[in-house]
Amino acid sequence: MPEITSTSQAQNSAASKAATNLASNFDDFLTLLTTQLTNQDPLNPTDSTEFTNQLVNFTSVEQAIATNQNLESLVKLTQMSQENALSASMINYLGKSVTTNLNVSALSDSEATWNIDLGSSAAKVKYDIYNQDGSIVYSKTEDSAAAGAQQYNWDGTTNSGTTAEDGAYYLVVTAETEGGGDINVDYSFKGIATSIDTVNGETVLKVGDVPIGLGYITSVTQPQTTDPSA
């Protein structure tokens, strides 16, 4: 579901803070104004126009802050409307098979699989697996790898010898030719969309534990079913 801005978040907006400060300063302003009126020379009173200008300037600031608050509210309503529309469109993807070109996979029951495609055969290839915090949890280097589409499997064992927790992980493959040239590596991930969630303020589809932004989905198809009579 879309993330709803809470009251505490609204109170922490720039315009709200400015309004709070203005209210505090207004008391000081009135005190100063009263002091000026009390202590002015009766034979040479301060020009009333000056007091009027001060009040007008203060009111202008107050109106500007109120305008900014209204604009912030409008922006938030627009964002919520867009998120609602995005969530509504994503509902049509639930239960469908979605494919993405992200280098992501889900570790479950000590098994994670990535679909990769090497542009040419490699004389050296390194596999680095990252968790969602961006930290490397596992690395492996091999002397060679064939060109073309293939799978890379990981059993969840980390560099420290422990077993990683289930969840989303990211594979980065660095492949080189015999002469040390870089080899292009493509990735793909496919699974059944099970839910809609909000991650870091972005509405995403969840394929198990894997979050996928709408912009990264390359195809959506009906999942293949096995005919029991076949």
Image (cartoon, rainbow, N blue to C red):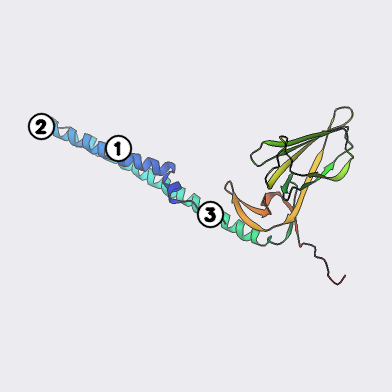
Nearer mark to the viewer, of 3 and 2: 3
Mark 1, residue position: 25
**Rendered residue at 23%/37% (across/down):** 51
Mark 2, residue position: 42
Q: Assess whether mark 2 and mark 3 are in contact (beta carbons under 8 angstroms).
A: no
What amino acid is at disc 2? Pro
Q: Position of residue 91 (x, y in %)?
A: 64, 61
The image quadrant where one finds the N terminus is bottom right
- Tell me if mark 3 has few (under 14), some (14-19) or many (20+) residues whose alpha carbon lies within 10 angstroms of its own: some
Element at badge 1? helix
- Sequence-wise, the earlier of marks 3 and 1 is 1
| Disc marking residue 80 | 3
Q: Nearer the viewer, residue 40 or 35?
A: 35
Q: Position of residue 53 (x, y in %)?
A: 27, 37
What amino acid is at disc 1? Asn
Element at badge 2? loop
Indicate whether 27 appears above or below 207: above
In the rendered structure, the answer to whether residue 60 lies left or right of residue 152 reads: left
Indicate whether 125 appears above or below 68: above
Q: Position of residue 77 (x, y in %)?
A: 50, 54
Question: In which quarter of the view is residue 219 placed?
Answer: bottom right
Q: Nearer the viewer, residue 150 or 214?
A: 150
- Sequence-wise, the earlier of marks 3 and 2 is 2
Task: Measure how far apart labels 3 and 2 are at the Cα level.
Answer: 59 Å
- Is residue 125 visible to us here? no
- Sequence-wise, the earlier of marks 1 and 2 is 1
What amino acid is at disc 3? Met
Question: In which quarter of the view is residue 49 placed?
Answer: top left
Residue at the extreme bottom: 229
Task: Measure how far apart labels 1 and 2 are at the Cα level.
Answer: 28 Å
Q: Nearer the viewer, residue 77 or 6?
A: 6
Q: How many marks?
A: 3
